[in-house]
Image (cartoon, coloured by chain):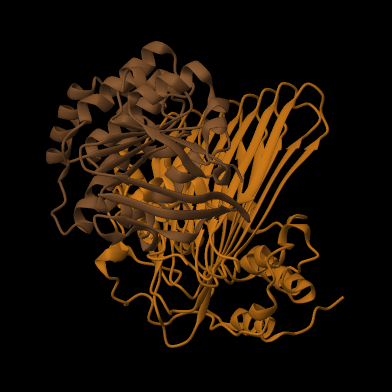
Chain colours: A orange, B brown
Amino acid sequence: MNAALTPFVESMQDAALAPRLPGSGLAWLDSARATALQAFVQRGLPEVRNELWKYTTLRALSQRRFAAHDAEAAMRMVPPSMLPAVAGDAVRVVFVNGVFRPDLSTSDRLPEGARLQPLSQALREQPEPLRFLLGAQDSEDDGFTLLNRALATEGVILRVEAGTKVAAPLHIVHVGLAGEREAAWHLRSLIELGEDASLDIVEHHVGESGAGHLANLVRDINLRDEARLGWTVVQTAGTEAILLRRCDCRLGDAATLDFHALELGGKLARHEVRVDLAGARARFSSRGAFVLHGRQHADTEILVTHRGRDTVSDSLWRGVADGRGRGVVHGRIMMQPGADGAEGGFYNKNLLLSPDAEIDTRPALEIYADEVKANHGATVGQLDENVLFYLRSRGIPLDMARRLLVRAFCAVTLDGIEPPALREHCGALLAAQLPESMA
Amino acid sequence: MLKIENLHVRVAGKEILKGLSLEAKAGEVHAIMGPNGAGKSTLGNVLAGRPGYEATQGTVTFDGRNLLEMEPEARAAAGVFLAFQYPVEIPGVNNTYFLRAALNAQRKARGGSELDSMQFLKLVREKVREMGMTPELLNRAVNEGFSGGEKKRNEVFQMALLEPRLAILDETDSGLDIDALKQVAAGVNSLRSPERAFLVITHYQRLLDYIVPDFVHVLADGRIVESGDAQLARELEAHGYAWVRERAPAEARA
């Protein structure tokens, strides 16, 4: 079955003709890319009948064309405000319109035991270890992961050796700037922590408002036994940005992943996070919030699979939609046979601030094991009139009262972000996103 | 200071106040008593501006201004304070932060300068000492997990900090044991001043043993049917509200 050759699919086919993909000439890579492109052309963009895309329609996107790259990306000036200092000693890696910028990055300052290479460099210097990552296909691939397999030019290849505790956070910044034409870029990253290694990553998405682009990010996170990763995503992309992100995480015995997310920008921002708690006593915690206005659309999919014994997952998400904003939250906990003693929880509360806003939340449990505990809960509501009146009766004006309550509603998801400077930074971004006046 | 004339108020399509008139001058403490359903809490809420409380007839002036036309926050800035019968819990909003936001919003609305955090903390510490407030309560979210007594004391503490000109206490005594009642009453008494008027709404005479009012009004079926001094409260306690209804003029019972 061939999907319709939409303008979007055509523009991606054109992009694949470009001779500039790093690593081209490697037979296994060329073949994998060609196969993936073919599969993408056949399948097209994900459709709403796909359970994971049920509330995110790509009909408008399918009619758009994107350039294969931004030729000026390596030279563009990045305003300092787009490279915030999240922690004084953070090591920074910057991508501008999908292109690695060594002039803005300090990844050579990573301590011994941690090695970071841009994907393009890794493919030039030692591609063989990436064969497993880039040469395969996966039954769980969707249109965007296939596109990514076909077209990824850049990314972060990071390995932290066993026992290495990296103290300073790693700050990965994705900057979207206006170019001659609207461009699409596809980044593929791999983050591997050896046994008992520890690292904190802050991933920023920033961008110019009004600059349209499509960023398609696919990452793999692999945490060996007893490794610990703190991962905070702060998304304040420009108003026209389209962000499609997927992350596949695998945790070994007693490994820990602490995930925080603050989704504030973008026109369409989707994040699909798949967590495989493969090892015994592996732990995943996630905290996140989105605040939407105008016609922003945010879609968060947290898909957790418990396979190891005594594994724990615990997710707490908050959503706020104003204007014609549309939020989607899908939390799925799957307990596989053998996951005895596992505990999973997914809790999501949402606020609608306007009659035209919409939030769809779906917690789902699939249990195939005995002796497990799983809980979920989801609500969509409005600001409590009694609380608003209480604040106003003390002299706090209505719009300020609303902002205060929305901020408090979301702030619970910022707890636990480390270091404190980053938590404060997130709190300030959140406050800045709160509508000045909410009708 | 406060002048209510022939006030009719409708809530959820039902007329609750049916021609209430009352005048309170600075320095006076007025107790509003009455049986359940008489409209006591409606009076407090309509004065504070709670949405859904619709005045269909009559006037309320506060320092010469038409109170009914003002937003709740403007009434607060003008000096109206309602101590809630059921103070709400606000998870995630720190009590100190809330108090500072409220005080500064009022100061700003009155054209004054806002207090910085040092000035504010100094003021809060002073008030904590004066009111015998538990300082730990200030570091918690507003009313979250507070006991009934703590909530009511927090209301009185807010009153002390915001220094309103007209303080309305809506059944501040309900649900309090005798010790908590005494503490709350002592707090209120310490705030009595020639510049400030109080409306003390209560179902029971008990509170009025500790906050001795200048005037007592009996509210029944949406209007004031009897007014007197503190002695009236004691007679009510002895005879019950039925006694007032019997004494009320026929037209008031209609």
Up-down: is B155 above or below A17? Answer: above
Q: Residue furthest right?
A: A1
Residue at the spot 30% in from the left edge and 37% down from the top edge? B198
For this rendering, which residue is in front, A64 or A403? A403
Q: Residue furthest top?
A: B179
For this rendering, which residue is in front, A6 or A266? A266
- Relative horizontal placement of residue B195, taking residue A110 as reference (left or right): left
Q: Residue A374 in the image: x percent, y percent?
A: 72, 31
Quarter of the image that includes the N terminus of chain A: bottom right
Can residue B147 be seen here? The reply is: no
Residue at the spot 65% in from the left edge and 34% down from the top edge? A345
Q: Quadrant of residue B176?
A: top left
Count all numbered tags in the image, as a single digit: 0
Up-down: is A340 above or below A389? Answer: above
For this rendering, which residue is in front, A287 or A196? A287
Q: Residue A195 in the image: x percent, y percent?
A: 51, 30
Q: Quadrant of residue A35?
A: bottom right
Q: Residue B207 in the image: x percent, y percent?
A: 38, 21
Q: Quadrant of residue A375?
A: top right
- Relative horizontal placement of residue A11, taking residue B3 as reference (left or right): right
Residue at the spot 19% in from the left edge and 57% down from the top edge? B110
For this rendering, which residue is in front, B227 or A65? B227
Can residue A28 be seen here? The reply is: yes
Residue at the spot 66% in from the left edge and 63% down from the top edge? A145
Q: Residue A239 in the image: x percent, y percent?
A: 46, 73
